[in-house]
Amino acid sequence: MTHRSAISIFSIGCILLWYVGGANAGAGDLCSHAWYKFIEEKVVTGDGHGHGPDVGSAEWKSVVEFKLGIRGNPDVPSRESDDWCRYIDETVRIGKNTSGGATNVSAKHPAAGPSFPCENVRSGSIEALICQEAELAVLDRKLSAVYADASQKAADQHPPVLQAEQRGWIKGRNDCWKSDDRYTCVREAYQRRIAELQAMYRLVPFTGPVRYVCDGSPTKKVIATYFQTEPPTLIAEHGDSVSLMYLRKSASGARYQGRNESLWEHHGEATIVWGFGAPEMQCKKAPSDGG
């Protein structure tokens, strides 16, 4: 064997060792818990709303196949075998799919459709409507991404509270089946929830805090922070209570409406109502005093 041949064989061996060892770095052994977590990071199976199949379960494997576009492909090995893990690992790393093209597995969700699988949704349900309407599917994917960002911010706070709130929001969204205009009801539900999460977790640029002194009393203050959401929002504080308000159409000035609170600003002055049936407060913008 020549010296050059020996070098070539050595180089090929190094490349193979890199592929087997380096390419699999961080993934762990195939079919191991670490490997399942690795695949979950590449092919997100949750619906973006705080819940999803248990990683490594039969349901999870089915969703992984769906996300990769290979469910039903006769070439896919049995989900109970090590060959299944090997096949999925290759699919994720190389990016192949059933049509022979490239699969963008780095994206959390497919380019089209909502953040959840549509094949098993109940006919006539709100989920079916979302699967049918492109704009609603786009909003669902956006909410999924915003919710993920909010979850990271909430990690050191109270993530179970965020999850419970999200489940409550889903229930409210699904109640849109009672509406005469289900499409508009669902669209507005998504828009408001996206804006709410972006404001509550400071995920978008904001202005403030802006302080308003009301009814001529220095101790009677409302502090508002304005967020560049769509629709625009503000979070106001008065005493020990906080209110999230959305911008509403107004003939003049900027009118924000919360559940039982409102703030209508015009030329540095604001008419604020705080609480159901409460009288209007006449407020003026005050210079920042750090308190």
Image (cartoon, helix red, strand yellow):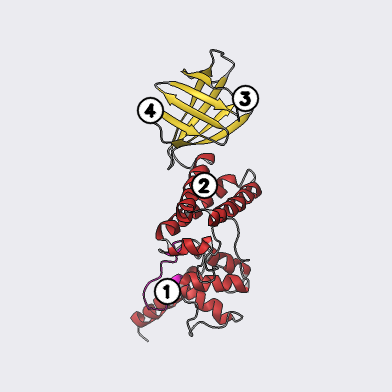
Disc 2 and disc 3 in contact, CB within 8 angstroms: no
Q: Residue at horizontal 52%, vertical 60%? A: 126
Taking 288 as reference, is 11 left or right? left
Q: Residue at horizontal 47%, vertical 76%? A: 70
Q: Is the magenta stretch mostly helix, strand or loop?
A: loop
Residue at image mark 2: 193
Residue at image mark 4: 252
Q: Which of marks 3 and 4 is nearer the N terminus?
A: 3
Quarter of the figure with residue 267: top left
Point out the frontmost of discs 1 and 4. 4
Q: Where is residue 22 in the image (x, y as percent from the top left)?
A: 48, 68
**Which three-letter amino acid code belongs to the residue tagged 3?**
Gly
Q: How far apart are marks 2 and 3 (CA)?
A: 25 Å
Q: How far apart are marks 1 and 4 (CA)?
A: 69 Å
Q: Distance between the residues labelled 3 and 1?
A: 66 Å
Residue at image mark 3: 239
Q: Earlier in the sequence, mark 2 or mark 3?
A: 2
Q: Earlier in the sequence, mark 1 or mark 4?
A: 1
Residue at image mark 1: 15
Residue 207 position (above or below residue 55): above
Secondary structure under tag 4 reads: loop
Secondary structure under tag 3 reads: loop
Q: Earlier in the sequence, mark 3 or mark 1?
A: 1
Membership of 158 in magenta stretch: no
Please name whichever residue, 279 or 116, is drawn nearer the observer in this view of the structure: 279
Label 4, residues with CA under 10 Å away: few <14, some 14-19, many ≥20? few
Start-end of magenta stretch: 92-110
